[in-house]
Amino acid sequence: MNFCRLALSASTLACLTLTTTAQADNYIGAGVAVIPVYEGSSTYRVVPLPLINYQSGNFFITPRAGLPAMGLKTHLSQDVEAGVFVGMDLGRKASRTARTEGLDNIHFHASYGAYVEWTPGPLSLGAAFRKAAHTGYGSVVELRASYAAWESGRHNVRIGVDTQWNSRSAMKTWFGVTQEEALSSQAGLSAYSPSAGFKSASLFSVWSYQISSNWSALTTVGVNRLFGDAKDSPLTAQKTNVFGSIGAMYRF
């Protein structure tokens, strides 16, 4: 399983981790990422970015939603792979920005799901379902595609797109404002109850450079755009966010 075929905002950090390599080797590494504090925020932060991919038989450990997850996979055919996984999802601390001050925190929580991937040559297409184990946090369906656009010597460039559909519970968790939160909002936000729908789409590119037979450097840049009720949320200060990362990994 590789990052390009999988899928701190959950969405942008997911793109950064799923695009960090174009090979299915085992590796470990680290990097740093520049991302919005939350999707739709006008404030950015720098966060550590774990890079890990390990597989043995049907067992794997690889990032999902930006954090390491583990699971089991199987090959349905030569180019089609499917699996299940359990992992962790990031939260949101309300006191981190003036716009969310006074709202409830979104807790760091466990999640579980399943995926299917089709990889005919340099093209990769995938779909995944992820549900938060925390009551009321909802579920996400992710559709993604990436393509090995250029390879020359030690250089490899891959481009991709990613879109996410959120259940009503997930939309309310990340973009909703309850009546109680509206009363305690330091930014004077009004109550807002979004519906289920497509939440965002991302376009990204990753450049990898092979330093040696074991070491590689990775750089990712991308842009994320909110749609529908997520775009119209009073929490959304910026409908379009950019993101990027740089890191290094050791293949073993």
Image (cartoon, helix red, strand yellow):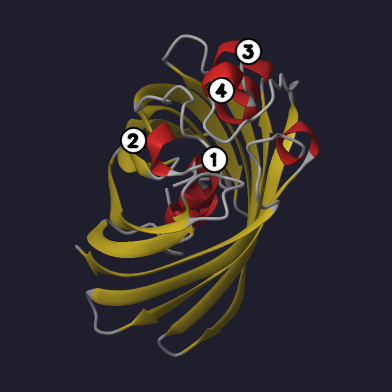
Is 229 or 161 nearer to us in this picture?
229
Closest to the camera, between mark 3 and mark 2, is: 3
What amino acid does circle 2 point to? Ala
Q: Tell me the number on the disc at residue 99.
A: 1
Camera-side mark, 2 or 1: 1
Where does the image place residue 160, in percent across and percent down from the top left? 64, 61
| N-term-proximal mark, 3 vs 2 | 2
- Whichever of labels 2 and 1 marks the residue nearer the N terminus, that label is 2
Q: Earlier in the sequence, mark 1 or mark 3?
A: 1
List the residue tagged with mark 2: 69
Dot 4: few (<14), some (14–19), or many (≥20) neighbours within 10 Å?
Answer: some
Q: How far separated are the C-alphas under marks 3 and 2? A: 35 Å
Disc number for residue 173:
4
Q: Marks 1 and 3, how far apart in space?
A: 16 Å
Amino acid found under the numbered disc labelled 3: Gln
Q: Residues within 10 Å of mark 3 (few under 14, many from 20)?
A: some
Q: Residue at x 51, y 35 (%)?
A: 100
Instruction: Name which of mark 1 and mark 4 comes first in the sequence.
Output: 1
The amino acid pointed to by label 1 is Arg
**235, above or below 183, in the image:** below
Quarter of the rendering occupied by the C terminus:
bottom left
Within 10 Å of disc 2 (Cα), the crowding (few <14, some 14-19, many 20+) is many
Horizontal placement of 124 versus 43: left or right? right
Task: Tell me what residue is drawn at x 31 percent, y 33 percent.
Answer: 70
Residue tagged by mark 3?
179
The image position of residue 144, as x and y in percent, is 64, 48
Callout 4, which amino acid? Thr
Q: Residue furthest right?
A: 228
